[in-house]
Image (tube, rainbow, N blue to C red):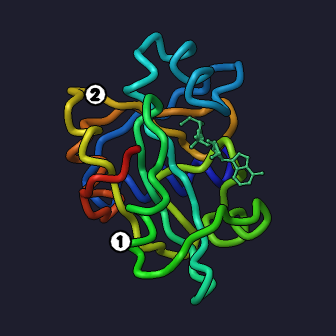
Amino acid sequence: MSGSIERVVSAAAETGLSIEVKRMGASTRTAEEAAAQCGCDVAQIVKSLVFQGETSGRLYLFMVSGANQLDLAKASALAGEPLKRADPRHVRDETGFAIGGVSPIGHRIALPAFADVKLLSHEIVWAAAGAHDAVFAADPNALISAARARVADLAV
Ligand code: 5CA
């Protein structure tokens, strides 16, 4: 198992979230690809989007359904500062994950996290597990708790 995936598994175990990481053997880099591999609706895929505060330079995690776009105005209001998309290298340094495999849990450095309320309308959601072909399924409430994310209206 890769170190990135191990961090996801450890973080889940530490927070009492029971997960089984699945290596799909095909790309799950995008929500559409992940949905095709998981055989689920794209709305059940959790996108883990990392943005950077323009003032503080701090990174923030936003968990949004694959069917929705992040509303940057709402996200900025929650962060308390304007946001821009984080540089991929910066994302990798702080989360330990490459874009396309960023998991909502198991980051190297804890990021303030927010989750869109629409994720709660599914019984099961799927999230990236730290690699480009790795995913896991979870109850959205349990996943959001494990990510220590605040539930908010984040979608456009
Ligand atoms: N594994 C899939 C499904 S869980 C996944 O990670 N999807 S994702 O949406 O969370 O991650 C891909 C997202 O990374 C894209 O939606 C996009 O917002 C972001 N992204 C793609 N390219 C870049 C880039 N060059 N810099 C910063 N963010 C990027």
| Quadrant placement of the N terminus | top right
Give the residue pinned by disc 2. Answer: 124
Left or right: 134, with 39 as reference point: right
Q: Amino acid at mark 1?
A: Leu
Residue 8 as seen in the image, left or right of residue 40: right
Q: Give the residue drawn at x 47%, y 74%.
A: 110
Most distant residue in the bottom direction: 56
Outermost right residue: 89
Counting labels gives 2
Residue tagged 1: 78
x and y percentages locating residue 52 in the rendered image: 60, 72
Q: Amino acid at mark 2?
A: Ile
Taking depth in this image into account, of 51 and 20 the one nearest to the observer is: 51
| Gap in angstroms between the C-alphas marked 1 and 2 | 26 Å
Which quarter of the rendering shows the C terminus?
A: top left
> Residue drawn at (20%, 31%), measured in percent from left and top?
121
